[in-house]
């Protein structure tokens, strides 16, 4: 008798599925990695989560929490089978406390839906990964996601004021605003990639919605000139809310499919946004930015004079990913985090690595906080290109660490980068992480074999 027959006695039967079709859907995420779940449980409330985890704990069954499956590191792939705990239907905005500027949400809430809801109240939730129309709050907490606005507003961890989570025994904990227990001890779950506990409710801090925005695009004859502009801006009090960099390979891809006008000899562009709730403040900072542009070695710049012009500027950024997919059969989408001062060196190294292995590499991302997206283009049907892509990625990670950076900014380690973890951390450091995993999950049933493999003690 399959184990789920017993689980069907404990849960509503319509939330449980062992059909081949549904198991096929939940076998993977946005990566190439695939698994095979034994069962999918589409939870709708906290009670169902507790029942499922309790059952999994008693029967030593792996349990894999999953949001929208938009992750870029294989973090939701059921590599050891077990139960995929699907949170897509546990997607309620439970309460918005406007007075205290706190949103209480279930983990399956889509980021953009929360942002739109609080905007109606004049409030703002800043973290906005590019997948925000799909990504769930639970998933962004698992990866501690950032996004375009993190240069000014920070990443997800800055906004978590309370958590409820279930441990590997099925016990429910409440921290932060949900109890009188301070949050720091539970904050280790943020960025743990769903490997330490299963979050069932989150309290998020909200800010006042910035109602005034100025959007600029600047044109540069080289990536290095653009990087120099980023460094100069960060040395001022201009304080942009967004500062994105897009290299020539990305621009070439975009201009093949979008009618976008660039100044002659443009190699790289920056997209910069300033925001404020005070007009004098915005006018001052915008003026400072324009004065700086005039002093620097740039081809030119444009300030959006209307919402339509601002949208046309953002079209350049939005079109990158889809355009790259149209010019290359496959791409390895890696993200590194590196000090902005080392942008010139990492760019030279990445381009040299691309030439060494005969690969096109696209660089773009969040210039303001050093989170760059490195897309290596290849053909999965060409074995030499597949091998070269792996070798190139490893060299890029090694170079990143040598320059004081990290092998991931917001995508996570998951399955995709676990073999490279030792490039950044010592054996003792990884050993300490494994001890934390065992402390939270001694039976190793919660999202096993992600980040690193841990052996169960007899």
Image (cartoon, grey):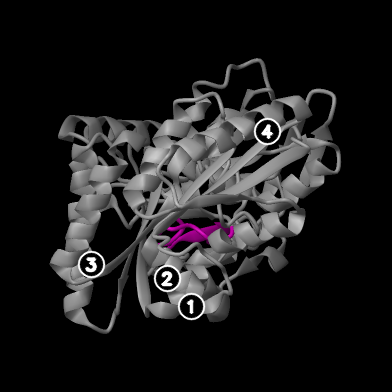
Q: Where is residue 237 in the image (x, y as percent from the top left)?
A: 54, 24
Dot in front, 4 or 2: 2
Q: Is residue 352 magenta?
A: no
Dot in front, 1 or 4: 1
User: Mark 1, residues whose alpha carbon is within 10 Å: few (<14), some, or many (≥20)?
Assistant: few
- Tell me if residue 155 can be seen: no
Dot 2: element: helix
Dot in front, 3 or 4: 3
Q: Tell how many labels.
A: 4
User: Mark 2, residues whose alpha carbon is within 10 Å: few (<14), some, or many (≥20)?
Assistant: some
Depth check, front residue: 427 or 196: 427
- Quote the CA–CA distance across marks 1 and 3: 24 Å
Which residue is labeled 4 in the image?
Answer: 204
Quarter of the rendering containing residue 154: top right
Which residue is labeled 3 in the image?
Answer: 389
- Quote the CA–CA distance across marks 1 and 4: 41 Å
Dot 4: element: strand
Which residue is labeled 2 in the image?
Answer: 252
- Whether tag 3 and tag 2 are in contact, CB under 8 A, the answer is no
Which residue is labeled 1 in the image?
Answer: 256
Q: Earlier in the sequence, mark 1 or mark 4?
A: 4
97 relative to 13, above or below: above
**Side of 388 relative to 123 (left or right):** left
Q: Magenta: predominant secondary structure element?
A: loop
205 relative to 214, above or below: above
Q: Which of marks 3 and 4 is nearer the N terminus?
A: 4
User: Mark 4, residues whose alpha carbon is within 10 Å: few (<14), some, or many (≥20)?
Assistant: many
Dot 1: element: helix
Please give the name of the residue rendered at 74% of the width and 35% of the height, measured from the top-left corner: 210
């Amino acid at each position: 008798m399959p184990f789920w027959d017993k689980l069907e006695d404990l849960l509503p039967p319509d939330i449980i599925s062992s059909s081949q079709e549904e198991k096929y859907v939940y076998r993977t995420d946005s990566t190439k990695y695939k698994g095979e779940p034994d069962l999918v449980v589409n939870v709708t409330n906290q009670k169902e989560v507790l029942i499922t985890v309790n059952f999994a704990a008693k029967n030593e069954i792996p349990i894999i929490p999953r949001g929208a499956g938009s992750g870029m590191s294989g973090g939701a792939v059921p590599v050891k089978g077990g139960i995929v705990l699907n949170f897509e239907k546990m997607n309620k905005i439970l309460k918005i406390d406007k007075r205290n500027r706190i949103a209480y949400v279930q983990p399956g809430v889509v980021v953009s839906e929360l942002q739109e809801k609080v905007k109606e109240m004049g409030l703002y939730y800043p973290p906005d990964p590019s997948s925000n129309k799909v990504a769930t709050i639970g998933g962004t907490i698992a990866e501690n996601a950032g996004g375009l606005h993190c240069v000014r507003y920070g990443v997800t961890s800055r906004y978590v004021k309370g958590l409820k989570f279930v441990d590997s025994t099925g016990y429910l904990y409440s921290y932060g605003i949900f109890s009188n227990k301070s949050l720091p001890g539970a904050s280790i779950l943020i960025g743990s990639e769903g490997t330490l506990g299963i979050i069932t409710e989150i309290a998020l801090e909200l800010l006042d919605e910035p109602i005034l925005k100025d959007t600029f695009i600047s044109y540069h004859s080289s990536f290095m000139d653009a990087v120099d502009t980023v460094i100069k801006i960060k040395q001022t009090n201009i304080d942009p809310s967004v500062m994105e960099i897009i290299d020539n390979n990305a621009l070439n891809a975009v201009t093949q499919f979008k009618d976008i006008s660039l100044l002659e000899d443009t190699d790289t562009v920056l997209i910069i946004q300033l925001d404020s709730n005070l007009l004098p403040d915005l006018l001052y900072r915008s003026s400072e930015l324009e004065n700086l542009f005039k002093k620097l070695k740039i081809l030119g710049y444009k300030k959006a004079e209307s919402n339509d012009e601002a949208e046309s500027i953002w079209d350049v950024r939005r079109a990158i990913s889809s355009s790259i997919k149209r010019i290359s059969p496959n791409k390895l989408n890696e993200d590194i985090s590196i000090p902005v001062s080392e942008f010139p060196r990492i760019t030279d190294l990445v381009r040299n690595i691309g030439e060494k292995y005969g690969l096109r590499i696209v660089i773009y991302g969040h210039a303001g906080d050093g989170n760059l997206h490195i897309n290596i283009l290849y053909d999965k049907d060409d074995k030499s290109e597949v091998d070269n892509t792996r070798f190139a990625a490893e060299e890029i990670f090694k170079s990143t660490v040598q320059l004081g950076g990290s092998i991931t900014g917001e995508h996570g380690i998951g399955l995709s980068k676990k073999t490279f973890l030792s490039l950044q951390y010592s054996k003792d450091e990884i050993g300490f992480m494994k001890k934390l995993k065992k402390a939270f999950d001694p039976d190793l049933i919660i999202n096993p074999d992600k980040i690193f493999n841990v052996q169960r003690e007899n």
